[in-house]
Image (cartoon, rainbow, N blue to C red):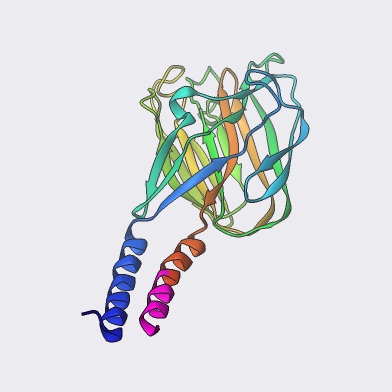
Amino acid sequence: MWTRGNLLSLGAGLFIALAAANASANTYNIDWMSLAPTPFGSAPPFVSSYNLAGIGTVNMTYSANSDFVEARLQVPQLAAGSVSYAGDSYAWTNQETLARTNWGFSGIINSSWFVTYTFPGTVPASKLVLGVQGLGRRDPNPGETTADATTEAIVLQNGTHFGDFTGALNVGPTQYTPGAGMFSMINSLSGPGGADPWWNTGLAVVRIDDAVNALTVRIDQTSGDGIGVNIGVITPEPATAALLVTGSLVALRRRAQR
């Protein structure tokens, strides 16, 4: 027969087991921002607003550049997938990007641009993720440096690289370099460039570890390269997952006291 003491012991044991499981293997979703109503393949406006679940209306602004063409893009191999970090899994089904290709119409080797996401309030630390894909390298031309032939993305916030999702694409790994209040990303492969896997990286997923009101991604993009950028939110938030475990114990204790 189950007594009050038995149930309390069971509840405590279940809490410990759930807490241990919660500490070692959580499953989260990443909801990527949709650029609708812009059709796939069409250029999003340089200034526009979109809805991001859990945050609200996000204003996206990106700089115009005559060397680039842009489009709302969804790569089938990356649209659904997951990455794992510290024993936790982060999965999605709706990944898409603002994609820009530097065709170098002006003859300039590298062209710089930025995209800024402005939020309706302060987004808590560790809720937001950034996705960057397609970072390329090519062979330097005579008189060029390696940096001239490399696309780099820079963010002036603290971040944690969860890893890359490649979707079986022939791509190079992202070289993620953290710093004090910043991080940068390039294609990590060296040697001959100008073709895959040097020409593209998979989807690098980076958690933003600061509370932010806006997030800016700065890109120095080499000619011929096309990349994609977008943001998403983690659901449920880690604090919420912990509360679910605590709530289970509270419910068991209430039942035991009846």
- The secondary structure making up most of the magenta span is helix
Residue 142 percent across, percent down from the top left? 53, 17
Front in this rendered view, residue 195 or 128: 128
In this picture, residue 150 sits left or right of residue 83 = right
What residue is drawn where x is 60% and y is 58%? 210
The answer to which image quadrant residue 51 occupies is: top right
Residue 204 percent across, percent down from the top left? 47, 38
Front in this rendered view, residue 188 or 143: 188
Number of dots carrying numbers? 0
What residue is drawn where x is 75% and y is 32%? 63
Q: From this viewpoint, which residue is outermost toward the left?
A: 1
The answer to which image quadrant residue 258 occupies is: bottom left
What residue is drawn where x is 38% and y is 75%? 252
- The image shows residue 187, relative to residue 70, as above or below, that is below
- The image shows residue 69, relative to residue 94, as above or below, that is above
Q: From this viewpoint, which residue is outermost toward the right?
A: 47
Residue 229 percent across, percent down from the top left? 59, 34
In this picture, residue 251 sits left or right of residue 53 = left
The answer to which image quadrant residue 232 occupies is: top right
Inspect the magenta stretch and tell me whether residue 197 lies in it: no
Magenta residues span 248-258
The quadrant of the image that shows the N terminus is bottom left
Residue 20 percent across, percent down from the top left? 31, 66
What residue is drawn where x is 62% and y is 32%? 220
Inspect the magenta stretch and tell me whether residue 253 lies in it: yes
In this picture, residue 49 sits left or right of residue 71 = right
- The image shows residue 144, relative to residue 242, as above or below, that is above
- The image shows residue 162, relative to residue 247, as above or below, that is above
